[in-house]
Amino acid sequence: MRRKIAIIGGGQIGGVLAQLIAQKQLGDIVLFDIVEDMPQGKTLDIAEASRIDGFDVCVKGTNSYQDIAGSDLVIVTAGLPRKPGMSRDDLLTTNAKIMKSVAEGVRDNAPDAIVIVISNPLDVMVTLFQKVSGFPHHRVVGQAGVLDSSRFATFIAWELGLSVKDINAPVLGGHGDTMVPLLRYANVNGLPVMELLERKYASAEKAKEVMTAMVERTKAAGGEVVKLLKTGSAFYSPASAVIAMTKAILNDEKRVLTCSAYLNGEFSVSGYYVGVPAVLGAKGVEKVLELNLDETEQALFDNSVNAVKKVVAEMETLGF
Ligand code: TXD
């Protein structure tokens, strides 16, 4: 039987996602938005490429939550993006209102779905979706780490002149300015990136300087794109990141991907969604994999968790 995938929010990310899902034939698609006609227009446009791209899936645009009934997977992209000068946390008030209504719509119409949330501020929006929907924690997950890690890997590939395919560069923590790129774990098919940098520059000091610049660029990478686009935020790469998670879930791949997952004591955190390595399969988040963090890394991770906690508390004082 074909899978059914609902995308809530048919804006920049939602549109690219619908096209990628169709081209990859991952399932039938329902694109929902509150804006009248827009999701219908985008899906018509995508469907009319089916003969050219050779895909057979149904692509439907809608303004009615009833159309998402029976979805195996729901991807939530609804919410405003940043403008230049804004932090992700500045989106809290507006996007919390949107997320609450989305969670109610999904809860009432697709109660058995696994849900990937992508709207910002990410970890807090995942928290809110789970709270309002009442879905089990393992069925609600956020996308951030796949993209943040890909950004870090891209900068390392450019620096070393090596294929990005061979680079693993985990980024943990909340999806904000405090995220934690793990330079000690960054490797090129097992070879530590730090060692390759030291060899390239014949200087431990210079290697550290170059790595620090890449870490800082990774942390600010979302803002770098916002500054260039001026009217919105990144959308191609976030959509690609969601595709990796979608495949892992729908094909029960057991991939280890960094995502915003609910922590129940792992990494010494309980009761919060934060970016950590997780096993994604048919049940959603099947396991959180812990890493040994040294003192500095744990301190950076704790700092990032505290930043998430602060915004969750702020959201609660707003009545959500
Ligand atoms: O890696 C990540 N997690 C992210 C997240 C990377 C980049 C951007 N990220 C965030 O995703 C961004 O900060 C936003 O919060 C979301 C969506 O970004 P996008 O660029 O797709 O924003 P758009 O183009 O403005 O699209 C949002 C759509 C738009 O069509 C609105 O009409 C719709 O959301 N919208 C709603 N849909 C359903 N229900 C409600 N209530 C609603 N309100 C607005």
Image (cartoon, grey):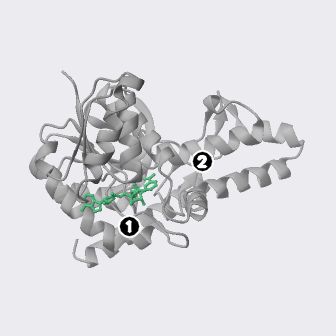
Q: Quadrant of residue 50?
A: top left
The location of residue 237, given as percent across then percent down, is 50, 45
Query: In the structure shown, which secondary structural element does the residue marked by tag 1 occupy?
Result: helix
Contact check, label 1 and label 2, Cβ < 8 Å: no
Q: Earlier in the sequence, mark 1 or mark 2?
A: 2
Q: Is residue 6 left or right of residue 145?
A: left
The location of residue 25, given as percent across then percent down, is 33, 26
Find the distance from the CA under tag 1 to the CA under tag 2.
21 Å
* Crowd class of label 2 (few under 14; some 14 to 19; many from 20; radius 10 Å): some
Which of the two residues, 147 or 308, is positioned nearer the viewer here? 147
In this rendering, the answer to whether 168 lies above or below 220 is above
Query: In the structure shown, which secondary structural element does the residue marked by tag 2 occupy?
Result: loop
Which quarter shows the C terminus?
Answer: bottom left
In this rendering, the answer to whether 70 lies above or below 207 is above
Residue shown at 34%/40% (left/top)? Answer: 45
* Crowd class of label 1 (few under 14; some 14 to 19; many from 20; radius 10 Å): some
Q: Is the CB of the residue bearing disc 2 within 8 angstroms of ligand 1?
A: no
Amino acid beneath label 2: Leu
Q: Which residue is mark 2?
A: 182
Q: Is residue 201 left or right of residue 126?
A: right
Q: Is residue 154 left or right of residue 90?
A: right
Amino acid beneath label 1: Lys
Q: Which residue is mark 1?
A: 309
